[in-house]
Image: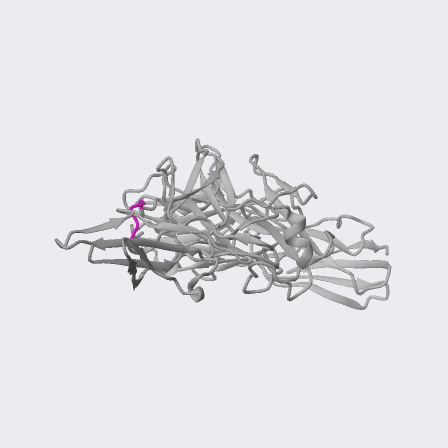
Amino acid sequence: MTNAKLFYRKGGENNFISVNMTSNGNTYSGEIPSSDVTLRGLEYYITAEDTSNNVVREPTDNVFSILVNITGEGLVKATPQPSGSAQTAYRLISIPLDVKNKSASSIFQDDLGSYDETKWRLFTLEDDQTYDEYSSSLTVEPGTAYWLIVKDPDKRIDTGPAKSFKTNGSYAIPINAGWTFIGTPFNYSIPLDHLTLSNGKNFSIEYYSGSWTPLTNSLQPFEGYAIHSENKTELLINPILGDGSSLPKKVNTQNNKNSKPLWTINIKATCQDAKDLHNEIAILPGSSEDWDYQDRPEPPIIGEYISLYFPHFNWNKISKIYSKDVRPEFEDGEIWEIEVLTNIKDLVKLSFENLKEIPENFEIILIDQKNQTTKNLLKSPEYSYTSINDKVPRKLKLIIGKHDFIKGVIEETIITIKDYQLFQNYPNPFNPTTVIKYSIPDIKQLDKSSNNVTLKVYDVLGKEVVSLVNKLQQSGNYEVIFNATNLPSGVYFYRLKSGQFHQTKKMILMK
């Protein structure tokens, strides 16, 4: 031998640092500076050259991996947990190391205090897609993510004593049929193209930050993600970046499809601070009217939520609801069934984006099947209604196409309302909210509005307390929530007026 070289790098880095090894007889040695020894682990390989210029590499097509240990509080998450309400503060969290004590109480209670549902909560997603709340026997598994919500600000999670995982081979995470919450066990970013399912199938990954978003870049330490698979399998994470990897880097995520649709409409749903922002319909040549890999399943719900999705119970798939519904080209028109579910009793707002992308000879009409109302979205790309039932989704139809096609769908869907009606509020008596329902009679022309509609509340002296409605409204059934939090107990009256019609009913606030 004439020389030997040591090539090393921190786990997750692309480039190696070379060190000329020193000889002592037939023994060669090289040193790695302590500053490069981190919880990302270490990777290295060695080359040696003889007098005939023959060079050998060990290992021949991979790297050696050195594990690194840490004591004390271990690795600390760089950012504090979000804090606040059940509408905004839930996050998925994972632990990016091989911790010595895997009990959830050991990992979380030293940072968050004893388990207290008013201070913080932790949930696991079970194989049957239900949630199981924290227990003292819960263990935190590497590669698994958990729902965590924290009330108080500035809370940081640490791992406690731990060591890095080997970085010279794939790490396997069990995946359920349906959704699985995952995280990277490595203390550095893992690009999406380093993930594969062992069965070679496609998969979908979502990231939650107050609303679900399709993941397009990489897995980050301490973060959690939701992955969807049609079958039980394993997710293989290849941690080797840059040179020295012989492991596969092909990815089959439906989030990274390169096919460009002709047009896409994004639908956003909000209710108070709860959001569901990434819902898409698209037209893509060659796609299927039935299920294909372009269609993206709707992720799980948690806390006080709003969820907008496209139901497809006729598809023979694990998921029955989807946040992305892609169809092939059509000539006359298409109908997308939409359902919106929320456990918040308040105003739901829907907005429709990119409507200018559709062909000029197409109209876009939204039908609210509960209220029996239509909305021309090209005139106003927003729609609102009041949510009153967290167990029954609001059913809508989005119709896109030529005028005659849309007219036919409306005639089949809308039931004619012939008379004005003001219904008794429910519940009654109430504290502090109640629902007032009323009907506006049929308007023959699609976009012609009725007379101005007002709905006002008065006290027993006839003084106006609040104006709940004051606007033009089309034919349909309407529901409004009246919140009397700031009013005293007593008898109140609500009055509906539209054109020549007016009617008043009594209700009782009992605190």
Q: Is residue 152 magenta?
A: no
Query: What is the x, y in percent for residue 273?
Result: 61, 60
Left-right relation of 361 to 137: left
Q: Residue at x 47, y 62 (%)?
A: 380
Task: Between residue 485 and residue 508, name the one nearer to us.
Answer: 485
Q: Residue at x 65, y 42 (%)?
A: 138
Task: Between residue 120 and residue 429, name the one nearer to us.
Answer: 120
Q: Residue furthest left?
A: 52
Q: Residue furthest front?
A: 25
Q: Residue at x 55, y 59 (%)?
A: 75
Q: Quadrant of the N terminus?
A: bottom left
Number of numbered discs overlaid on the protein picture: 0
Left-right relation of 246 to 371: left
Task: Between residue 144 and residue 499, name the one nearer to us.
Answer: 144
Q: Quadrant location of residue 334? A: top left
Q: Is residue 162 above or below residue 286?
A: below
Residue 441 visible to the viewer: no
Query: What is the x, y in percent for residue 504?
Result: 76, 56
Q: Quadrant of the C terminus?
A: bottom right
Q: Which residues are magenta?
A: 244-248
Q: Does the magenta stretch mainly form a helix, a strand or a loop?
A: loop
Residue 30 visible to the viewer: yes
Left-right relation of 211 to 362: right
Query: What is the x, y in percent for residue 80?
Result: 59, 64
Q: Is residue 461 above or below residue 480?
A: below
Query: What is the x, y in percent for residue 170?
Result: 39, 44
Q: Residue at x 44, y 64 (%)?
A: 34
